[in-house]
Image (tube, grey):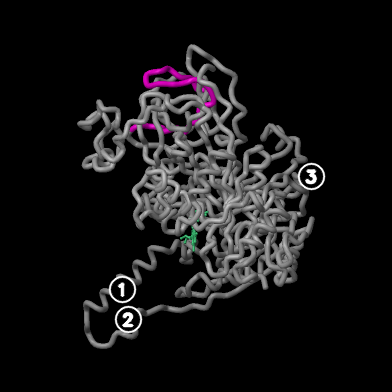
Amino acid sequence: MKQPVGGPKRCSELPWHDTGYCSNLPAFLLFAFKDTIDLSKFPVDRIRNFCIIAHIDHGKSTLADRLLEMTGAIATTDKNKQVLDKLQVERERGITVKAQTATLIYSHQGQQYLLNLIDTPGHVDFSYEVSRSISACQGVLLIVDANQGIQAQTVANFYLAFEAQLAIIPVINKIDLKNADPERVETQIEKVFDIPREECIRISAKLGTNVDKVLQAVVDRIPAPMASTDDPFKALVFDSNFDHYRGVVANIAVFGGRVKKGDRIVSAYLGKTYEVNELGLLRPHEHPTQKLFAGQVGYIIAGMKDVKEAQIGDTLYLQEQPVEALPGFKPAKAMVFAGMYPMDQSEYQGLRSAIERLTLNDSSVTVQRDSSMALGAGWRLGFLGLLHMEVFNQRLEQEYNASVIVTAPTVPYKAVLSSPKLIKEHGSEEITIVNPAQFPDRSVVSEYLEPMVLGTILSPDTYTGKIMTLCLNRRGIQKNMVYIDDQRVMMKYLFPLNEIVVDFYDLLKSLSSGYASFDYENAGYQAADLIKMNILLNGQPVEELITIVHRGRAYSTGKAMCERLKDSIPRQMFEVAVQASIGSKVIARETIKAYRKNVLAKCYGGDITRKMKLLKKQAEGKKKMRRIGNVEVPKDAFINVLKRKDK
Ligand SMILES: Nc1nc2c(ncn2[C@@H]2O[C@H](COP(=O)(O)OP(=O)(O)OP(=O)(O)O)[C@@H](O)[C@H]2O)c(=O)[nH]1
């Protein structure tokens, strides 16, 4: 592998390589981890594997910081803020995107315990990360904010843990807040989850209050993993990362036996054999050890060159001791698709390599090559949700300095074909359409299907009326409505995914002054009367703006899209007609008046440097535009065009 100039040294070149403490960490950190951990000293009954689950911002990462501090995994300083949120985007947005693992050593009643903690993301788009973290655990800490109470993701995450039959420890966080009402939250927990209020632990993760009780509860209430070192080695891959120097680093939970450096292991999924180069614990940084035993959670590096080789949910076993594969997971299903194009075709290669590298670490993104008349060569990417897409985009810009145009997101529609010729061509009667430009015509289709979701909304009851109107506007069908205490309601709605994917959550938040929360789960497909709507700029159809709409909504959606395009496309030197059409019939039109922006108009006199500065600024602004036909379109216009302004 090529050594980057000035990059970190490879393990084998570091002076302490032979000591078994090698890692890509800087030296001062390495010495901090020079405590030898004899893992064989931790029999399975003194191991606890648990994850922290909660609604966004209820304090998972802050609690994880405190647990790491209290067990000595990191030093106690006020600088420990969301230590497990390692990505720049996580720190900027204050959200967890990727689940992280940390092994803690905890002394309780004279005994040492090995605790494996997995901090998981709270947002609905990343619930896939939660479900796979759960599969490596026997218990969860369910965190609920003492002020906000149970929210939509609390409910969704509770059910993930409940269905997996894990021990659930309810933890009420932020009791230091002035408006904290732990009594009320306990009532909600009793009512919604049927957990006795006595089981709740009231804490302040920020101040560290009662966090020791959480550690005790982990040991007392979460069962040890059911695994034996006498069994053949068997491990579940529950996460993986790509490291440019060492290849794939797979996070594993050992369900039986033991594995050591130099062992030859087999991936049950691919049937390929690898040699174990390195393994160890995550504390939370990599801490190499000689072996991993049944019940433990750690990482393994075995010369896998692509994350596809370390399939999430795969089983690893020793070459000489084949075992039956563990159940694994359903692959994450992309629910939102969008085109991604370089701002300029000369940046195509750079963007391609950035996308490839980023998808190496995020196997839930699907990538297909695509091209368009206006935007040139690009890709069609599939994401778990809109936030996932935004985070991916932000990471491309921040970590790879790539500037991209993202087209309007769409959901995966299906069509049942009626034309025998097309059925033969596609090899099946039912096709999935992820690019609206390829939406088949009604004449060759017997039925269109759209993806549905079951949404859960929790809100104070004062906003119920407004929320019901919003849901109705989004073709929602109410399935259920219950009070979870004397002021808060939980509503269940069946929605077409397309209606909630772009801006539903923002609108729900703003009409409830931030108090309502929303989560959803897939609910299959339903037949729908769908049509393809074109958008034309000066008579030229723009493929990237083709949208699939429900027939009953075509007129209002077309009108709204034209209005929003009028707002986002700046005036040009000529008049621009923005039209929405169905087939050849124009259903809406807006006109952008001609205008010539003379940036020097206010520049009196002959200050040449000032003039140059203004002209440079204008040129930079133009770089963020894309020419479609003869019209300059800002890159954000493609995505903003779908954002509605429901009342
Ligand atoms: N007052 C108070 N604030 C807290 C407490 N715990 C966490 N916070 C704050 O709540 C905010 C969210 O905390 P995080 O730990 O990032 O929450 P999270 O659940 O990990 O968030 P996601 O990763 O986005 O799901 C931060 O501003 C924390 O400082 C607490 O006990 N008291």
Indicate which disc, 3 or 2, sits on the residue closer to the N terminus: 3
* Quarter of the C terminus within the rendering: bottom right
Determine the CA span between mark 2 and mark 1: 8 Å
Find disc 3 in the rendering and name its residue.
446
Query: Which image quadrant is residue 305 in?
Result: top left
Find disc 2 in the rendering and name its residue.
600
Q: Residue at x 63, y 38 (%)?
A: 166
Residue 498 placed where, x, y %?
A: 66, 55
Counting every numbered tag in the picture gives: 3
Check disc 1: other Cα within 10 Å, few if <14, some if 14-19, many if 20+.
some
Indicate which disc, 2 or 1, sits on the residue closer to the N terminus: 2
**Circle 1/circle 3 CB separation < 8 Å:** no
Element on which disc 2 rests: loop
Q: Is mark 2 within 8 Å of ligand 1?
A: no
Q: Which amino acid, mark 3?
A: Ser
Query: Which image quadrant is residue 314 in?
Result: top right
Q: Which residues are magenta?
A: 246-268
Q: Residue at x 63, y 58 (%)?
A: 151
User: Relative to 465, is 536 on the left or the right?
Assistant: left
Residue 65 to residue 464: above or below: above
